[in-house]
Image (cartoon, grey):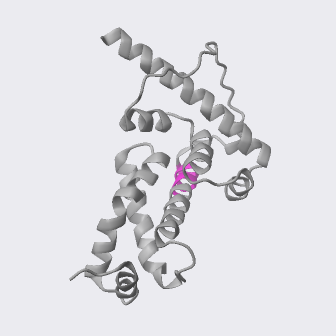
Amino acid sequence: MAIDEKQLLELCKKGDRAAQERLFRIYSPVMLGICMRYAKNKQEAEDVMQEGFIKVFTNISGFRGEGSFEGWIKRIMVNTSLNHYYKAKKTASNMSFDDIRETQIVSENEEEVPELRFSQAEMLEAIQKLPEGYRQVFNMYVFEKFKHREIAELLDISVNTSKSQLSKARTHLKNTLLRMEQDKKQTQ
């Protein structure tokens, strides 16, 4: 018997484990993709996603049906990814967000990104190579469709810093993709 999303949500709100497992199976592939864009590797992304789903199930009664349920989960995953970053940063690094923000990327090669198509895995690899600050702004702007004002509020940076981070992220990505293309040509 098929069950629609509304019924599934009601069962999840009542703590039905089978319904929660089904909801997890439905949404986890997309949510893992979101977490992968913010994480350093797949294991970290899986950990963040698990933490995010715990928040989803803990707070599911707070979903009022305004907007899509998938959009609500995505927002939780993005926020969980950002929280994970800040927790890791506090415990593992002495570098401040200002240091990341001020990192200069100098491009010697102003060529356009080549027409060569990159696989999804190669694109994800290039995104994961971005410095943390660049990666966060890039993901929030490009994939999550946040406006610079929203990004600035969430990351506690200025709107101009958000714009600068995005520009630097694009330059960094372009250079990474150019290097990947050169490496491909050399191995052919």
Start-end of magenta stretch: 84-91
Q: Is residue 104 left or right of residue 135?
A: right
Seen in the picture, residue 90 relative to 172 is either above or below; the reply is below
Q: Nearer the viewer, residue 134 or 149?
A: 149
Give the residue displayed 52% in from the left and 46% down from the top: 92
Position of residue 187 relative to residue 171, above or below, is above
Quadrant in which the C terminus appears: top left
User: Where 43 falls versus 173 (above or below)?
Assistant: below
Q: Residue furthest bottom?
A: 14
Look at the image and say whether residue 30 sits in the magenta stretch: no
Residue 85: within the magenta?
yes
Residue 27, percent from left and from top? 37, 65
Rendered residue at 74%/50% (across/down) = 157
Q: Is residue 154 left or right of residue 58?
A: right
Q: Residue at x 42, y 35 (%)?
A: 125
Q: Residue 84 in the image: x percent, y percent?
A: 51, 56
Instruction: Report x, y in % for residue 153.
Output: 73, 58
Query: Which residue is more in the foreground, 104 or 20?
Result: 20
In this view, 71 is above or below 123: below
Which image quadrant is residue 75 in? bottom right
Choose between 5 and 90: the one closer to the eye: 5
Q: Residue at x 41, y 86 (%)?
A: 13
The number of callouts visible is 0
Where residue 51 sits, quadrant-wise, is bottom left
Q: Is residue 40 left or right of residue 100?
A: left
Q: Quadrant of the N terminus?
A: bottom left
Q: Which residue lies most toward the left here?
A: 1
Magenta stretch secondary structure, dominant: helix
